[in-house]
């Protein structure tokens, strides 16, 4: 009986060592490509702590990915991992928990990307957005790829535009979360450290998104005033009202 007990202990230890040192490169090869949302290249390390020098999505190189899996999550039927992505267009860290029921939760994520990536969304073709956006996702839960929980904030640092006009705006912010009537949305504003005053709100649902904001040149800054003419219709008081809609609820405007 004792011999069987020690054989079982030895078998568990061996399995634990194999699992802890299982090459990530081999694991990626064994996993069907259809199960991966991205393509991983130059993979090294183990399934528990590893890296991929290149992460590709639809042919675009997102950068270098590192991960650390928390084994305790497996006891709850989850894959719980800390991720870090370093790329020219995207840089971020966060904790991702994928449950057995297919839900995914992201917590404490911090992502930085160039403001120019928002140009298609904001739809101001005459201007190029400059600066960087720091996105903080405090909590995001996806079920069937549909968000059911979301809170966080975005900060556009060194905000400004170039192209048709050149102007600096200062620091702009957005806070977002769940709305009482369903969907998600939040507020838009500025930190008061630049020549642009911003006040607005936005919301998004399964049908689409919409945003409305009032922009004003603080202290009648001439560069900001000229840039605002490309963003919306100038009002009698010198402000500009900016509106945009998209998705099934309406066409971009």
Image: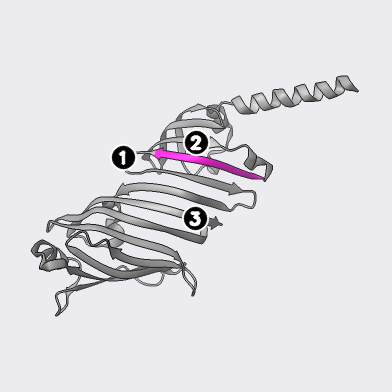
Which mark's residue is nearer the viewer, 2 or 1? 2
How dense is the environment of label 2, judged by Cα within 10 Å: few (below 14), some, or many (20 and up)? many
Q: Height in image: 21 above or below 198? A: above
Location of residue 116 in the rendering, given as x and y in whole percent from the top left corner = 26, 52
How many angstroms separate mark 1 from mark 3 (CA)?
25 Å
N-terminal-most mark, 1 or 3:
1
Judge by depth and name the residue closer to the eye, 169 or 30: 169
Q: Mark 3 falls on what kind of element? A: strand
Res. 139 mark? 3
Who's the residue at 50% across and 50% down the image?
Answer: 107
Which mark's residue is nearer the viewer, 2 or 3? 3
Judge by depth and name the residue closer to the eye, 10 or 231: 10
Q: Is residue 227 left or right of residue 131?
A: left
How dense is the environment of label 1, judged by Cα within 10 Å: few (below 14), some, or many (20 and up)? few
- For the C terminus, the quadrant is bottom left
N-terminal-most mark, 2 or 3:
2
Q: Height in image: 233 above or below 157? A: below
Q: Mark 1 falls on what kind of element? A: loop
Res. 88 mark? 1
Residue placed under numbered mark 2 in the picture = 67
């Amino acid at each position: 009986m004792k011999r069987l007990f020690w054989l079982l202990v030895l078998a568990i230890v061996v399995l634990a060592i194999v699992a802890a040192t299982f090459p990530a490169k081999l694991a990626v090869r064994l996993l069907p490509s259809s199960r991966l949302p991205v393509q991983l290249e130059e993979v090294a390390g183990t399934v528990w702590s590893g890296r991929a020098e290149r992460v590709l999505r639809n042919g675009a190189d997102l950068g270098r990915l590192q991960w650390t899996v928390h084994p305790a999550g497996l006891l709850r039927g989850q894959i719980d991992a800390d991720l870090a992505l370093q790329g020219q267009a995207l840089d971020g860290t966060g904790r991702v928990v994928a449950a057995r029921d297919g839900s995914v939760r992201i917590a404490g994520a911090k992502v930085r990307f160039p403001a120019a990536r928002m140009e298609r969304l904001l739809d101001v073709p005459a201007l190029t957005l400059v600066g960087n956006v720091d996105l903080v996702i405090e909590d995001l839960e996806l079920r069937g790829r549909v968000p059911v929980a979301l809170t966080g904030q975005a900060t556009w640092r060194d905000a400004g535009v170039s192209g048709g006009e050149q102007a600096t705006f200062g620091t702009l912010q957005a806070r977002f979360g769940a709305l009482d009537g369903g969907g998600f949305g939040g507020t838009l504003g500025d930190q008061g450290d630049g020549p642009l005053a911003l006040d607005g709100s936005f919301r998004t649902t399964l049908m689409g998104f919409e945003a409305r904001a009032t922009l004003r040149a603080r202290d009648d800054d001439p560069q900001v005033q000229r840039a605002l003419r490309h963003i919306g219709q100038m009002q009698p008081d010198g402000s500009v009202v900016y509106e945009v809609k998209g998705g099934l609820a309406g066409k971009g405007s």
